[in-house]
């Protein structure tokens, strides 16, 4: 089982997200570099102050700056730690604004005494006291360690980071709002191009008009812009498509005209061939058996060719919108007569008729609709074996008159079903006529039904084939129409 395809983002969303992500990334990088640079600068200035404090503290009569006293670094000291080691004697003190001078714990003393003299300042974290920049010097009497608190440095850099973060967030939100509007305006021409392509895609180009009036507006075909290039290319393509459709229409029209003219011209010689062969065979003169058989074959083939020519002529006229005479047609007697004719032609089959006890009136050509039903019944007769049950029914459904022809024969191959209503479509051996067929019967069905603004469909599987014809009902009041006296069903 394949995983469902993830829905792709639109170009508008990708552009807005890209702009917002870029601004957010720039803001984070700039803010981070600024905060780090400031912190390094403040730590360097604190280290310089630490050197001076340490020099003063180790000098004779020196002192440690008091807490809160301004320093040369531009900020106030919040806490100071001092450790003096002389032999086995260790003295330490914590000077902070949060408490009075307090001796350091042994752990804090040990940690501060680990700082090696002469190696410069380093950062030391003391439990419960915070972080300090600590430096140690060797004196004649021992080691002195002094540390200045990093609390003020940390507070300054934290405030700056919060300011940068707030400004970056506000900038990203503003950029998302303005970017959405700007991108929407910028992509409007592309939307108009897409709308034009959509309208063209919805046109019935296979059967509709060959003239394509849809074009991208001129303001969206500027070759200096990317969208204009797309619009100009689409207009050029639509022009080529229109020319191709016109060429196809002209070619099809020539073919239809040729078929109509050829079919019309062939009717007379075929009738003459049939007449002369029938006249010769019935002249009463004794003819050799081979000659008699040949004349019979000529007569039968001329009959078959005449039927083929008539079908081709009918299709050509239907393509031109001719040949139909519309009036109100009751599908109930039409179907009953067609089933009766089919039963007479195929008594080896079982025929079932199912019709309502009221008329089903449609607007159409009665002769051609009878031909539709007759072709469907003949198709079921010729393509199934003797004993097959063929059912024909008519009913009304939501403004449609529906005719169905169903059989329980071997079915239509699945590969043939999409091509079933095309001209000269032939089935495989399981559904082909023993005497040969023209392949135009179902094509005539589709053409006549389409000319009546109806629909025809087929459902087939082994053991069940069903053709369904839907025709729009006539706009008449059928409640006052006399009921058909025929029985509702006939089983032969």
Image (tube, rainbow, N blue to C red):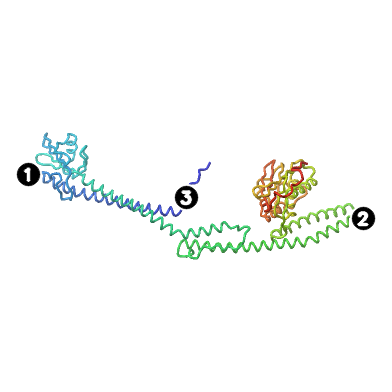
Residue appearing at x 86%, y 59% in the figure? 276
Instruction: State the residue in front, 478 or 105.
Output: 478
> Count of labels shown?
3
- For residue 375, side relative to residue 158 (left or right): right
Camera-near label (2 vs 3) is 3
Q: Can you say whether 191 is above or below 332 in the image?
A: below
Looking at the rendering, which quadrant does residue 444 occupy?
Answer: bottom right
Q: Secondary structure at mark 1?
A: loop
* Label 1 Cα crowd, 10 Å radius (few <14 / some 14-19 / many 20+): few
Q: Residue furthest front?
A: 480
- For residue 315, side relative to residue 205 (left or right): right
The residue under label 2 is 284
Q: Secondary structure at mark 3?
A: loop
Q: Considering only order in the chain, which callout, 3 or 2, is on the residue closer to the N terminus?
A: 3
Q: Considering only order in the chain, which callout, 1 or 3, is on the residue closer to the N terminus?
A: 3
Q: CA distance from mark 3 to mark 1?
A: 76 Å
The residue under label 3 is 8
Q: Residue 280: x percent and y percent?
A: 88, 57
Looking at the rendering, which quadrant does residue 353 occupy?
Answer: top right
The reply to whether residue 352 is in sight is no
Q: CA distance from mark 2 to mark 3?
A: 84 Å
Q: Are marks 1 and 2 in contact (CB under 8 Å)?
A: no
Q: CA distance from mark 1 to mark 2?
A: 160 Å
Q: Considering only order in the chain, which callout, 2 or 1, is on the residue closer to the N terminus?
A: 1
Camera-near label (3 vs 1) is 3
Q: Which mark is residue 199?
A: none
Q: Secondary structure at mark 2?
A: loop
Q: Residue 483: x percent and y percent?
A: 74, 47
The residue under label 1 is 61
């Amino acid at each position: 089982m394949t995983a469902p395809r993830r829905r792709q983002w639109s170009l508008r969303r990708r552009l807005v997200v890209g702009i917002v992500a870029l601004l957010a990334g720039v803001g984070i990088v700039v803010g981070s570099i600024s905060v780090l640079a400031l912190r390094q600068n403040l730590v360097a200035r604190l280290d310089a102050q630490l050197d001076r404090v340490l020099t003063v503290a180790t000098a004779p009569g020196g002192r440690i700056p008091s807490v809160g006293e301004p320093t040369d670094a531009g900020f106030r000291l919040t806490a100071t730690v001092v450790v003096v080691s002389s032999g086995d004697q260790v003295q330490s003190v914590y000077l902070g604004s949060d408490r009075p001078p307090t001796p350091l714990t042994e752990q804090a003393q040990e940690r501060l005494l680990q700082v090696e003299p002469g190696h410069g300042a380093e950062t030391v974290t003391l439990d419960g006291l915070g972080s300090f920049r600590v430096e140690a010097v060797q004196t004649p009497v021992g080691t002195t360690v002094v540390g200045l608190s990093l609390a003020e440095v940390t507070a300054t850099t934290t405030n700056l980071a919060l300011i940068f973060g707030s400004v970056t967030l506000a900038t990203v939100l503003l950029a998302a709002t303005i970017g959405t509007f700007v991108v929407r305006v910028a992509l409007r021409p592309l939307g108009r191009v897409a709308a034009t392509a959509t309208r063209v895609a919805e046109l019935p180009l296979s059967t509709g008009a060959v003239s394509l009036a849809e074009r991208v507006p001129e303001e969206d075909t500027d070759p200096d812009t990317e969208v204009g290039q797309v619009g100009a290319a689409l207009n050029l393509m639509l022009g080529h498509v229109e020319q191709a459709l016109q060429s196809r229409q002209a070619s099809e029209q020539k073919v239809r005209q040729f078929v109509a003219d050829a079919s019309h011209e062939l009717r007379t010689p075929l009738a003459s061939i049939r007449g002369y062969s029938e006249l010769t065979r019935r002249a009463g003169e004794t003819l050799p058996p081979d000659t008699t058989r040949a004349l019979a074959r000529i007569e039968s083939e001329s009959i078959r060719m005449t039927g083929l020519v008539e079908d081709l002529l009918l299709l050509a006229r239907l393509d031109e919108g001719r040949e139909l005479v519309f009036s109100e047609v009751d599908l109930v007697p039409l179907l009953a007569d067609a089933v009766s004719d089919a039963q007479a032609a195929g008594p080896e089959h079982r025929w079932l008729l199912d019709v309502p006890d009221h008329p089903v009136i449609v607007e159409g050509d009665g002769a051609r609709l009878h031909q539709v039903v007759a072709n469907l019944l003949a198709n079921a007769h010729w393509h199934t074996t003797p004993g097959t049950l063929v059912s024909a029914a008519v009913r009304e459904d939501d403004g449609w008159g529906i005719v169905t022809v169903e059989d329980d024969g071997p079915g239509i191959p699945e590969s043939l079903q999409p091509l079933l209503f095309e001209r000269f479509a032939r089935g495989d051996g399981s559904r082909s006529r023993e005497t040969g067929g023209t392949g135009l019967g179902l094509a005539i069905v589709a053409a006549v039904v389409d000319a009546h603004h109806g629909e025809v469909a087929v459902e087939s599987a082994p053991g069940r084939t069903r053709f369904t014809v839907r025709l729009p009902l006539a706009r008449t009041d059928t409640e006052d129409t006399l009921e058909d006296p025929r029985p509702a069903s006939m089983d032969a």
